[in-house]
Structure formats: C-alpha cells, structure tokens
Amino acid sequence: MVIANREILDLAVSDAPDCGIMFITTTFDIEGYNIVEYKGLVRGIIVRAPTISQGILGGLKFIIGGQIGSYTEMCEQARQHAYDSMLAHAAELGANAIVGVRYDASDVGNAQSSATEVLCYGTAVIIQKK
C-alpha cells in the first residue's frame, strides 16, 4: 500500500516497515516519524510519444483550439508509469518511504518525431515512528 497524503498518514497504526506500507511525500520529513536511514536517490523515467490517432486528434485540436484530451491521457499515463517505476526502485533498495518527490518533463526529439520524457524522483529512506 502507498500512502501519499498527510491525512491518511495519521491512520497508520503500526510502524511502516512491518506492514508493507510505502509513505510518499513531497516534503522532506514525515510528521510523527524519524528518518533513520537514507537509501539514496530513486527515480522512474519513461519516454512516450503519441500514437497516430492521438497525433491526428491533437493536430485537429491544435488548429481549432481547446483541451487536447488524447495528449492529456498520454501524459497522465506517462506520469503514472514513472511514479510506479520510482516506487519499484525504492522497494529494491529496501526503503519504506520516499521524501522530496518531484516530477520533471521535457520534450525529446524534433517537430517531426516528438516525444515526452517524464521523470519522477525523490529520496528513498527508512522511517520509524517517534
């Protein structure tokens, strides 16, 4: 189970290492817990390009204006994949929490063959209740 919300965090009744919970936060500490070991930087990365149909629909929306739903869906899937990869990386290191989580995205390629790179990263740690 992944907990990424401070309100939900307070519902945890036992130490995270013993119950398989991975705490995720954009802050650099977790209220009620001490960081007892830093495992290091963890990241997940994916490079996604739109499908042919997404490209055609996106091109039409670009001309007439409006939200490009197919691109939004592609970007959300890329963010989720990068996030999941980051969690797997932290689990491989034996962490039970990730602090300082951030996303970064950039365009890769040129106008004829563009793709989007999405990076999700943070610091893997081991936490214990105070």
Image (spheres, rainbow, N blue to C red):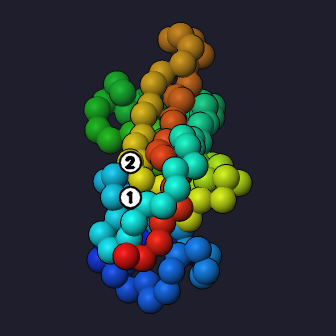
Residue beneath the point at 51% across and 80% down: 15
Q: Position of residue 124 (x, y in %)?
A: 53, 51
| Left or right side of 46 for 27 | left
The crowd level at tag 2 (other Cα within 10 Å; few <14, some 14-19, many 20+) is: some
The crowd level at tag 1 (other Cα within 10 Å; few <14, some 14-19, many 20+) is: many
Residue beneath the point at 53% across and 29% down: 117
- Looking at the image, tell me whether mark 2 or mark 1 is earlier in sequence order: 1
Relative to 89, residue 64 above or below? above
Of residues 59 and 106, the one drawn nearer to the viewer in this rendering: 106
Relative to 58, residue 27 above or below? below
The kind of residue tagged 2 is Gly
Q: What's the distance in space between the residues labelled 2 and 1, CA to CA?
A: 6 Å
| Left or right side of 43 for 7 | left
Q: Quadrant of residue 130?
A: bottom left
Q: Position of residue 86 (x, y in %)?
A: 58, 49
Question: Does residue 89 show up?
Answer: yes
Secondary structure at badge 1 equals loop
Of residues 45 and 87, the one drawn nearer to the viewer in this rendering: 87
Residue beneath the point at 61% across and 36% down: 46
Question: Does residue 120 show up?
Answer: no
- Farthest residue to the right: give it: 92
- Name the residue that disc number 2 marks: 100
Q: Quadrant of residue 66?
A: top left
Question: Dividing the image into 4 quarters, which one contains the N terminus?
Answer: bottom right
- For the residues labelled 2 and 1, say whether their Cβ atoms are less than 8 Å apart: yes
The kind of residue tagged 1 is Thr
- Name the residue that disc number 1 marks: 25
Q: Position of residue 29 (x, y in %)?
A: 33, 58
- Farthest residue to the bottom: give it: 13
Q: Position of residue 25 (x, y in %)?
A: 38, 58
| Left or right side of 6 for 94 | right
